[in-house]
Amino acid sequence: ADGSEQTRLTTNPGFDGQPAWSPVEDVIAYTSYQNGGYRIWRMNADGSGLRSLTTGFEPALSPDGQQVAFTRWEDQKGLWVINVDGSNEHLVIGADRARSPTWTPDGQSITFERTVESKKCRKTPFGCLTDEELRDRFGGEKCITDRGRTMCIDDFPVISYNYTNPADLEVWVKTFRE
Protein backbone atom coordinates (compact mmCIF):
# COMPACT_ATOMS: atom_id res chain seq x y z
CA ALA A 1 0.00 0.00 0.00
CA ASP A 2 1.66 3.19 -1.18
CA GLY A 3 -1.10 5.59 0.01
CA SER A 4 -2.05 6.64 -3.52
CA GLU A 5 -5.67 5.48 -3.10
CA GLN A 6 -6.60 8.13 -0.50
CA THR A 7 -9.83 10.10 -0.75
CA ARG A 8 -10.43 13.27 1.25
CA LEU A 9 -13.92 13.14 2.74
CA THR A 10 -14.19 16.53 4.51
CA THR A 11 -13.35 20.05 3.35
CA ASN A 12 -13.94 22.14 6.49
CA PRO A 13 -11.06 24.64 6.92
CA GLY A 14 -11.23 24.03 10.70
CA PHE A 15 -10.87 20.83 12.72
CA ASP A 16 -12.40 17.61 11.37
CA GLY A 17 -11.30 14.53 13.29
CA GLN A 18 -12.03 11.72 15.72
CA PRO A 19 -13.57 9.51 13.00
CA ALA A 20 -15.48 6.39 13.99
CA TRP A 21 -16.40 3.72 11.41
CA SER A 22 -19.58 1.71 11.80
CA PRO A 23 -18.83 -1.99 12.24
CA VAL A 24 -21.84 -3.07 10.15
CA GLU A 25 -22.55 -0.25 7.69
CA ASP A 26 -20.43 2.03 5.54
CA VAL A 27 -21.10 4.99 7.84
CA ILE A 28 -18.58 7.30 9.51
CA ALA A 29 -19.26 9.59 12.46
CA TYR A 30 -16.77 12.35 13.24
CA THR A 31 -16.24 15.61 15.13
CA SER A 32 -16.03 18.96 13.38
CA TYR A 33 -15.27 22.36 14.89
CA GLN A 34 -17.22 25.02 12.99
CA ASN A 35 -18.62 28.41 13.92
CA GLY A 36 -17.23 28.28 17.45
CA GLY A 37 -18.45 24.83 18.51
CA TYR A 38 -17.87 21.09 18.25
CA ARG A 39 -20.50 19.05 16.41
CA ILE A 40 -20.98 15.37 15.65
CA TRP A 41 -21.53 14.62 11.96
CA ARG A 42 -22.30 11.42 10.07
CA MET A 43 -21.68 10.56 6.45
CA ASN A 44 -21.51 7.57 4.19
CA ALA A 45 -18.05 6.09 3.68
CA ASP A 46 -17.83 7.71 0.24
CA GLY A 47 -18.47 11.19 1.73
CA SER A 48 -22.10 11.42 0.62
CA GLY A 49 -25.09 11.72 2.94
CA LEU A 50 -23.42 14.33 5.18
CA ARG A 51 -25.62 15.24 8.15
CA SER A 52 -25.02 17.18 11.37
CA LEU A 53 -26.35 15.18 14.33
CA THR A 54 -25.74 17.27 17.46
CA THR A 55 -23.21 19.20 19.53
CA GLY A 56 -20.43 17.21 21.18
CA PHE A 57 -17.26 15.34 20.33
CA GLU A 58 -15.50 11.95 20.42
CA PRO A 59 -18.18 9.86 18.65
CA ALA A 60 -18.24 6.07 18.97
CA LEU A 61 -20.60 4.00 16.82
CA SER A 62 -22.44 1.12 18.47
CA PRO A 63 -21.70 -2.46 17.34
CA ASP A 64 -25.02 -2.59 15.43
CA GLY A 65 -24.24 0.77 13.77
CA GLN A 66 -27.52 2.31 14.94
CA GLN A 67 -26.34 4.64 17.73
CA VAL A 68 -23.53 7.10 18.39
CA ALA A 69 -22.14 7.58 21.89
CA PHE A 70 -20.39 10.91 22.40
CA THR A 71 -19.30 13.33 25.07
CA ARG A 72 -20.27 16.89 25.82
CA TRP A 73 -18.40 19.31 28.09
CA GLU A 74 -20.84 22.23 27.94
CA ASP A 75 -24.46 22.67 28.99
CA GLN A 76 -25.47 19.22 30.22
CA LYS A 77 -22.04 17.65 30.59
CA GLY A 78 -21.58 13.93 30.28
CA LEU A 79 -21.92 10.84 28.16
CA TRP A 80 -24.69 11.00 25.54
CA VAL A 81 -26.21 8.68 22.93
CA ILE A 82 -28.06 9.59 19.72
CA ASN A 83 -29.41 7.44 16.88
CA VAL A 84 -27.49 7.72 13.60
CA ASP A 85 -30.58 9.30 12.02
CA GLY A 86 -30.42 12.13 14.59
CA SER A 87 -33.36 10.97 16.72
CA ASN A 88 -33.58 9.93 20.37
CA GLU A 89 -30.72 12.04 21.75
CA HIS A 90 -30.38 11.47 25.49
CA LEU A 91 -28.01 11.92 28.38
CA VAL A 92 -26.76 8.54 29.60
CA ILE A 93 -24.86 9.80 32.62
CA GLY A 94 -23.90 13.25 33.80
CA ALA A 95 -20.15 13.48 34.23
CA ASP A 96 -17.74 16.39 34.14
CA ARG A 97 -15.08 15.91 31.48
CA ALA A 98 -16.28 12.54 30.20
CA ARG A 99 -14.00 11.28 27.41
CA SER A 100 -13.22 8.37 25.11
CA PRO A 101 -16.53 6.46 24.96
CA THR A 102 -16.16 2.86 23.78
CA TRP A 103 -18.99 0.36 23.27
CA THR A 104 -18.65 -3.19 24.51
CA PRO A 105 -18.87 -5.78 21.69
CA ASP A 106 -22.43 -6.76 22.72
CA GLY A 107 -23.59 -3.10 22.69
CA GLN A 108 -24.97 -3.36 26.23
CA SER A 109 -22.43 -1.08 27.91
CA ILE A 110 -20.21 1.89 27.20
CA THR A 111 -16.92 2.46 28.96
CA PHE A 112 -15.53 5.96 29.25
CA GLU A 113 -13.01 7.93 31.25
CA ARG A 114 -13.64 11.02 33.32
CA THR A 115 -11.90 13.30 35.73
CA VAL A 116 -13.08 13.29 39.31
CA GLU A 117 -12.83 17.08 39.55
CA SER A 118 -12.70 19.76 36.93
CA LYS A 119 -10.05 22.40 37.31
CA LYS A 120 -11.12 26.05 37.14
CA CYS A 121 -9.02 29.19 37.06
CA ARG A 122 -9.25 32.85 36.08
CA LYS A 123 -7.90 34.06 32.76
CA THR A 124 -5.46 36.84 33.70
CA PRO A 125 -2.48 38.66 32.17
CA PHE A 126 -0.38 36.50 34.54
CA GLY A 127 -1.72 33.22 33.16
CA CYS A 128 -4.53 30.97 34.34
CA LEU A 129 -4.63 31.41 38.14
CA THR A 130 -6.96 30.34 40.94
CA ASP A 131 -8.47 32.96 43.26
CA GLU A 132 -5.95 31.94 45.93
CA GLU A 133 -3.01 32.35 43.52
CA LEU A 134 -4.31 35.78 42.45
CA ARG A 135 -4.76 36.90 46.04
CA ASP A 136 -1.14 35.84 46.75
CA ARG A 137 0.02 37.79 43.70
CA PHE A 138 -2.03 40.79 44.90
CA GLY A 139 -0.25 40.72 48.30
CA GLY A 140 -3.22 39.17 50.11
CA GLU A 141 -5.66 41.76 48.79
CA LYS A 142 -8.69 41.31 46.55
CA CYS A 143 -7.58 44.24 44.32
CA ILE A 144 -4.33 45.97 43.39
CA THR A 145 -3.44 49.16 41.55
CA ASP A 146 -0.60 48.91 39.06
CA ARG A 147 0.49 51.88 36.89
CA GLY A 148 -2.73 53.73 37.70
CA ARG A 149 -4.96 50.76 36.78
CA THR A 150 -6.94 48.89 39.42
CA MET A 151 -7.38 45.15 38.94
CA CYS A 152 -9.61 42.96 41.11
CA ILE A 153 -9.89 39.19 41.24
CA ASP A 154 -13.52 39.28 40.06
CA ASP A 155 -12.51 41.29 36.96
CA PHE A 156 -11.08 38.12 35.39
CA PRO A 157 -13.41 35.47 33.89
CA VAL A 158 -13.46 31.95 35.30
CA ILE A 159 -12.53 29.37 32.68
CA SER A 160 -12.02 25.62 32.64
CA TYR A 161 -8.42 24.54 32.95
CA ASN A 162 -7.85 22.35 29.90
CA TYR A 163 -4.94 20.30 31.22
CA THR A 164 -6.02 16.87 32.39
CA ASN A 165 -3.77 15.31 34.96
CA PRO A 166 -3.58 11.57 34.22
CA ALA A 167 -3.63 10.94 37.98
CA ASP A 168 -7.15 12.44 38.06
CA LEU A 169 -8.61 10.09 35.43
CA GLU A 170 -10.88 7.17 36.25
CA VAL A 171 -12.44 4.50 34.02
CA TRP A 172 -16.23 4.09 34.30
CA VAL A 173 -18.82 1.83 32.68
CA LYS A 174 -22.55 2.39 32.07
CA THR A 175 -24.64 -0.72 31.39
CA PHE A 176 -27.95 -0.31 29.53
CA ARG A 177 -29.46 -3.78 29.64
CA GLU A 178 -29.15 -6.68 32.03
Image: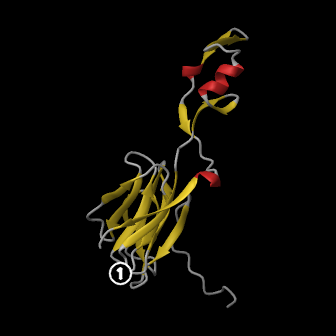
* Most distant residue in the right direction: 147
Give above or below for 51 relative to 155: below
Give above or below for 64 relative to 169: below
* Most distant residue in the top direction: 148
Q: Is residue 74 left or right of residue 117?
A: left
* Most distant residue in the front direction: 178
Residue 138 appears in the figure: yes
Quarter of the rendering occupied by the C terminus: bottom left
Give the image location of residue 37, x and y in percent: 47, 50
Give the image location of residue 158, x and y in percent: 53, 32
Q: Quadrant of residue 54?
A: bottom left
Q: Residues within 10 Å of mark 1 (few under 14, many from 20)?
A: few
Seen at 67% across and 91% down, the residue is 1
Q: How is the image coloured?
A: secondary structure
Give the image location of residue 127, x and y in percent: 68, 33
Disc tally is 1
Seen at 46% across and 67% down, the residue is 111
Q: Secondary structure at mark 1?
A: loop
- Quick one: 105 or 7, which is closer to the camera? 105
Amino acid residing under circle 1: Asp
Q: Quadrant of residue 135?
A: top right
Q: Quadrant of residue 147?
A: top right
Give above or below for 123 relative to 172: above
Give above or below for 107 relative to 77: below
* Most distant residue in the bottom direction: 1
Give the image location of residue 76, x and y in percent: 37, 48
Residue 150 appears in the figure: no
* Disc 1 target residue: 64
